[in-house]
Image: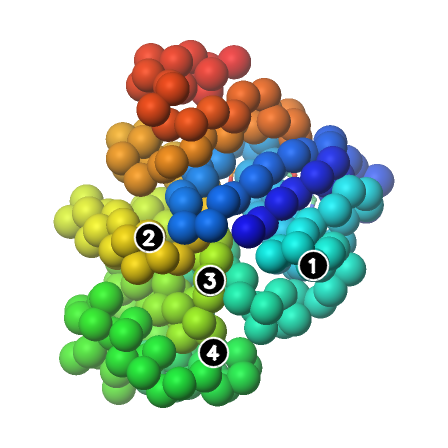
Amino acid sequence: MLSVHGLSAGYGRARVLFGVDLDVADNSVTCVMGRNGVGKSTLLNTITGLITATSGQVTFDGTDITRRPAHARVRAGIGYVPQGHESFAPLTVAENLDVAWEAAGRGPRTLVDGALELFPRLVPLMGRHAGVLSGGQAQQLAIARALVTNPRLLILDEPTEGIQPSIVAEIEEAIATLHARGIAVLLVEQYLDVALRLADTVTVLDAGAVVHSAAREDLSTEQVQSLLAI
Ligand SMILES: Nc1ncnc2c1ncn2[C@@H]1O[C@H](COP(=O)(O)OP(=O)(O)OP(=O)(O)O)[C@@H](O)[C@H]1O
């Protein structure tokens, strides 16, 4: 579904990614892991078009999207939940969902109902301003905003970061449900246990390059721990 080949990117003259190769198969969960600062967010931002690749290729469903703007990638079916669960703080939860739904080309209105079914905690908060939500509520809203764009591939950058444990469990369950519904997932996740429960494939980055990639069943927890301690 998603194929990343030889992808390099950075900030000005600072190179961060060095020829990354990565594949996300249809209906699979790929988890990208690595220590702080190795380039995980940069990789996701380059795949989604927020950062321009300096070389390499991003292919989605067989189409080269490397030079396409971010909004075109959303419309092609790539939903993105960036790190930091930011929404439009002065808008209500309902307005935030509507803005995302409209920006993605107004798919079926059932997309909004489906997102709220997945995150029922948002239902009584529809009239609240996003800026007053707790971290967990804001993260659920951020994922819901990506879902109303009708993604076939959902990309999430550390969706459990700084979130209280009960909500972490709900977010894990939501990702597992989306996977069961046939949505492919590309996930950066720092909690090893969450990552290893969800992942079909684990890819480890270090210093902007892939140092290991394997099917989850071929990796023990200890192997992943030692790869992350490089
Ligand atoms: N906007 C930016 N301008 C310049 N350098 C940046 C920028 N964003 C990130 N970097 C640098 O790029 C490198 C990779 O950062 P990135 O955020 O992609 O790593 P990460 O693996 O996602 O880290 P973390 O786990 O802390 O989120 C780091 O050295 C970081 O300081």
Q: At which x and y percent is residue 2? A: 58, 49
Residues packed near mark 1 inside 10 Å, few (<14), some (14 to 19) or many (20 plus): few
Label 2, label 3: how far apart the Cα atoms are: 10 Å
What distance separates the C-alpha of mark 2 from that of mark 1? 23 Å
Whether residues under marks 2 and 3 lie with C-beta atoms below 8 angstroms apart, the answer is: no
Looking at marks 2 and 1 on the same chain, the residue that comes earlier in the sequence is marked by 1
Q: Is residue 107 left or right of residue 112?
A: right
| Residue at 65 percent of width and 43 percent of height | 4
Residue in view at x 23 percent, y 66 percent: 118
Q: What amino acid is at disc 4?
A: Ala
Q: Percent position (x, y) of residue 38?
A: 59, 31
Q: Amino acid at mark 3?
A: Arg
Mark identifier at residue 152: 3
Does residue 105 sit above or below 88 in this rendering?
below
Q: Position of residue 151 (x, y in %)?
A: 46, 66
Q: How many marks?
A: 4
Can residue 132 be seen? no
Secondary structure under the numbered disc 4 in the rendered image: helix
Q: Which mark is residue 63?
A: 1
Image quarter of residue 189: top left
Q: Is residue 40 left or right of residue 176?
A: right
Q: Earlier in the sequence, mark 1 or mark 3?
A: 1
